[in-house]
Image (spheres, rainbow, N blue to C red):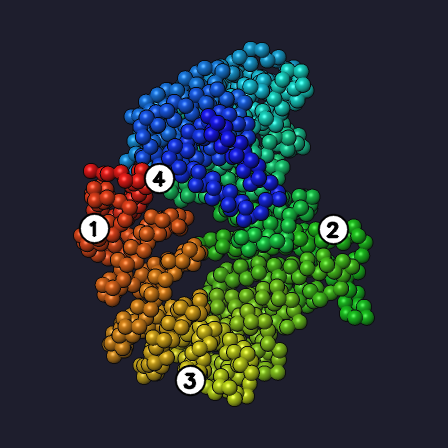
Amino acid sequence: MASEEASLRALESLMTEFFHDCTTNERKREIEELLNNFAQQIGAWRFCLYFLSSTRNDYVMMYSLTVFENLINKMWLGVPSQDKMEIRSCLPKLLLAHHKTLPYFIRNKLCKVIVDIGRQDWPMFYHDFFTNILQLIQSPVTTPLGLIMLKTTSEELACPREDLSVARKEELRKLLLDQVQTVLGLLTGILETVWDKHSVTAATPPPSPTSGESGDLLSNLLQSPSSAKLLNQPIPILDVESEYICSLALECLAHLFSWIPLSASITPSLLTTIFHFARFGCDIRARKMASVNGSSQNCVSGQERGRLGVLAMSCINELMSKNCVPMEFEEYLLRMFQQTFYLLQKITKDNNAHTVKSRLEELDESYIEKFTDFLRLFVSVHLRRIESYSQFPVVEFLTLLFKYTFHQPTHEGYFSCLDIWTLFLDYLTSKIKSRLGDKEAVLNRYEDALVLLLTEVLNRIQFRYNQAQLEELDDETLDDDQQTEWQRYLRQSLEVVAKVMELLPTHAFSTLFPVLQDNLEVYLGLQQFIVTSGSGHRLNITAENDCRRLHCSLRDLSSLLQAVGRLAEYFIGDVFAARFNDALTVVERLVKVTLYGSQIKLYNIETAVPSVLKPDLIDVHAQSLAALQAYSHWLAQYCSEVHRQNTQQFVTLISTTMDAITPLISTKVQDKLLLSACHLLVSLATTVRPVFLISIPAVQKVFNRITDASALRLVDKAQVLVCRALSNILLLPWPNLPENEQQWPVRSINHASLISALSRDYRNLKPSAVAPQRKMPLDDTKLIIHQTLSVLEDIVENISGESTKSRQICYQSLQESVQVSLALFPAFIHQSDVTDEMLSFFLTLFRGLRVQMGVPFTEQIIQTFLNMFTREQLAESILHEGSTGCRVVEKFLKILQVVVQEPGQVFKPFLPSIIALCMEQVYPIIAEAFGQSFLQPDIHLFKQNLFYLETLNTKQKLYHKKIFRTAMLFQFVNVLLQVLVHKSHDLLQEEIGIAIYNMASVDFDGFFAAFLPEFLTSCDGVDANQKSVLGRNFKMDRDLPSFTQNVHRLVNDLRYYRLCNDSLPPGTVKL
């Protein structure tokens, strides 16, 4: 024993040294190596058993348990059966003897180690494993310990993480399912006993003024008065021990519910008991009493009581999230909903809004989150099932949800509730579409609730009603979706407004428009406060309070303009005539507002608080342009209705809009405003297309501005948009006019001069521009190429789906620029950024204008590309230039694909040279590059390249190409299988499985007959018998789900067999 004693002292001192601040990393590595070597010794577990029973050092105990864990999970098969029996006997005894004194993390680890043994040996060699747990739970002294063991068993055996064979995993789940009824009965008993015991002794609190409220709503929600009475019982005050036991029981239930199917084992009495505990989360009065009585009665604090509510709601939500509900369970569900809505009523029970909000603020934040999750699951998964029950009052439920939503104490809580309303509105919309006959009846049922929702959501986005909350929202930091908290708030709110508009258009419009009108009056009235100062114009509003009020009004106007824009789609199509007057009113107001902003140049005005008011004024102006743009489809429909008369009203709307746009197309205007104006111009040119657009003086002004060589160039995005608009004005056919009235000759001349002006500098470049003795710096040359090609490519892309005439004119104008591009291409072949842009341009040309380009020129382009993309050049692009190089090759292949797919005989002559290049050069290099990347540990690179490989297969049928099938296919399958076996990229299991399927499906016969046996033969660490079992278990299924399941089974069992074989002592003879 001395040696064990000495070893323990040495280990304690090593552990203390290891965790000491002064110990160097080198010394730590030495100690780690020493400890690992000790753990690998046969019989080390005996020392660890002694250490566990003889030390109080936490580090030593943790180390000893890790040794046991490693022994059981990695070496168990090789441990002699006598030793196993001893371990199975000693560890539970140790747990029983010390569980009350051990630190909780050591106790939990010891439980986990015992459960690990059960996972390996129960029921064959450890037949009393589960019986022992049930006995622990039933004995009052060890109930908490039994519950910890039960939860650990559920976690480790129902969904085992360690390597086990698939057959064993299935066996364990079945064994556990056989125990479910007993376990649920025990847990129900524990919770009921605690509740009943404390209910009897609980002092009944004095009735509150509202506690007698069991009016219509409550009796509607609960079928029988007895349920209401039961749920109205005062909540008992628990002692610490009882609270601990109940929280453990609820944690067990939550985990069990996550994997067991809904069935009769989940009894009504269990559900009712869980709901009793859910009340702990929302009973503020009891929480307050607990905190008052806490000191004298050894009671739990209000916070811990709240935790019981959170755990109970977790159980309920686990059940709620199951979409597959057996018929016999539907009644239970209905009961669950009724009981939860009783709780919802308790939470929101008060006519005084302030009181409801303060009550929600007092509740545990996690409880509110769980409750919101419940409501979301109810609406998304079960509403369609429950709405048909006559005894379930949906309208009353919506009333409660409304109160709950608009009294949320946090923004996140409010967002989550808006999501629930969006789900409900989607449900309602699809229900109406599927039952159009009942449309009126359905809408009448919900109309009041929807109008109330709309009004309140609109109030919530206005500073006028909700300033304190809105000012808390961050409008600077971007989230993963590239929007600020404020933008997200507004977008989600406007989605709800739009969905209500779809259902109740008239109501929605009459609610929204007057509010918009009020804020517009303030904005339009600013003109009277503008005074001329030395340096320009100034807004003469200086009092702090007035500035604050103006700021709020402008923010609200900006939001309401977005709301009005969002509703534009509900004025077009079949309802155009019926809602014409409403839409015209909106559009006229928007045109007036945009012109007003541009004329008095509010975006350049001086203000008393420039950091606040100037952005506000710019935003309102930009939003008014964006809102008007949203009505471009309405204007297009208006245009087609009046095209014969060209009524003055329509002409005025368009020309006034142009008067508002033109002053903003300038480098002096802020980007936000400039881009809004450009987008509106594009919509007028592309969507509305009025015949008279080109003759409006304001449009002429824009043409002159863009083609003037001395004018400053706009920022890239704006330049591209304006050029697109001007090109479209000249190229797009006018709606409702015959071909002979389209004025093509004059439009063609104008388009040629437009393109000529836009490409002036580009056409002057020579192939020598990249040579060392060039006259212009390379960066300047690259800039000209970038600026010109981005504009020209956009023009071609936007014309590609149009009539032949439009495309002919476009190509005539572009011809010289295209030839210059082809001449420049070889000079820039080693500049992958330029090659990328040029190929992008050519790809767009081939997609949109290949017929117009004609065969000879197409042949010249393809030949140039084929000559340039040598094997060396492809290798340089793919292997050394990263993502840009890959994009270059991808675009090159896409161009070849467009040519090959062209119907008819036109491009047939190119086929042999294209196919030869792809087969002999492109595919082998691509495969080599991808193959290399799959051997790297970088998971992001692996994921990206797996995606590229799969995309190439989807678009180019890569796996089907003969060279790939014969030389590379099964090499790739082999690499991907090895990656799965080594668990190096476990996060991508599903994607890798699908890729293996896509490769194998090209030649299933070859996969099953040749590859699989070959793969198994080459597998080391498994014997012949195990290989044959692995082969037999891989069924010859050819559908994706079964095949990938077989792949994962093969990988799992291969790992398991290797683990088993590694755990056998050296020299073991296997027969």
Residue pictured at 32% horizontal, 50% vertical = 993
> Which marked residue is nearer to the observer: mark 4 or mark 3?
4
What is the crowding at mark 2: few (fewer than 14 residues within 10 Å), some, or many (at least 20)?
Answer: few
Q: Earlier in the sequence, mark 3 or mark 1?
A: 3
What label sits on residue 978 in the rendered view? Answer: none
Q: Earlier in the sequence, mark 2 or mark 4?
A: 4
Q: Which residue is mark 3?
A: 823
Q: Which amino acid type corresponds to the residue marked 1 in the rendered image?
A: Pro
1040 shown above or below 711: above
- The answer to which of 476 and 685 lies nearer the viewer is 476
Q: Earlier in the sequence, mark 4 or mark 1?
A: 4
- The answer to which of 636 and 259 lies nearer the viewer is 259
Residue pictured at 24% horizontal, 62% vertical = 965
Q: Label 3's element?
A: helix
Q: Label 4's element?
A: loop
- Whole-number angstrom distance, CA of label 2 to CA of label 4: 66 Å
What label sits on residue 549 in the rendered view? Answer: 2
Q: Which residue is mark 1?
A: 1013
Quarter of the image where one finds residue 622 = bottom right
- Whole-number angstrom distance, CA of label 4 to CA of label 3: 62 Å
> Which marked residue is nearer to the observer: mark 1 or mark 2?
1
Q: Which residue is mark 4?
A: 163
- The answer to which of 23 and 259 lies nearer the viewer is 23
